[in-house]
Amino acid sequence: MPVHHVANGGMICAYDPLPEDRFVVVILGTPSGPRELHTTPIHLYDAALAFAQKYAQFMEHPITLLPITAREYIDRNRDELTRLWDRLSREARANAVAVYEGRLQ
């Protein structure tokens, strides 16, 4: 894991994305432990790193960038995704399944 030190003593722990990674989780270190700030698509990894570089100097604890796979994203967010799925209309659910199965272009 590469560790980047930032001016004024800040630190960033940035894991390199693997080919199968689809998201990056931005995690802030806090006195009470790590807290997830947000998750963004992997194609925005460089923007997440730029954010970490900008704000790490003001942080007492490290900022971590953790690339994850789609399966890991689902496992981490299962309850929220279930609530979202339950709110979708029948047509929206059918379209989502069709996209997943490659039937809807």
Image: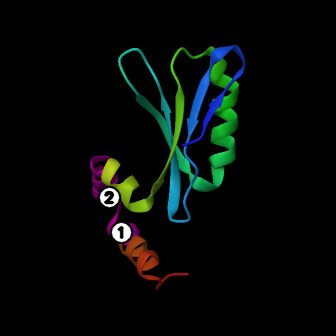
- Locate residue 91, reporting x and y percent: 38, 71
Q: Looking at the picture, how far across and down is residue 18, in whole percent?
A: 54, 60
How many badges with numbers are in the image?
2
Answer whether residue 38 is visible to the viewer in this image.
Answer: yes
Residue in the image at 34% along x and 63% along y? 89
Do callouts 1 and 2 mark residues in contact (Cβ within 8 Å)?
yes
The percent position of residue 103, horizontal first and vertical second, equals 46, 85
Measuring from the top left, give residue 64's x and y in whole percent.
Answer: 52, 34
**Mark 2: few/some/many CA within 10 Å (<14, 14-19, 20+):** some
Does residue 54 sit above or below 93 in this rendering?
A: above
- Which quadrant would the C terminus be assigned to in this image? bottom right
In this image, 95 relative to 8: left or right?
Answer: left
Mark before the other along the chain sequence, 1 or 2: 2
Structural distance between the alpha carbons of marks 1 and 2:
7 Å
Residue 93's tag is: 1
Q: What's under tag 1, amino acid-wise?
A: Arg
Residue bearing mark 2 = 85
**Where are the magenta residues, as a range?**
77-92
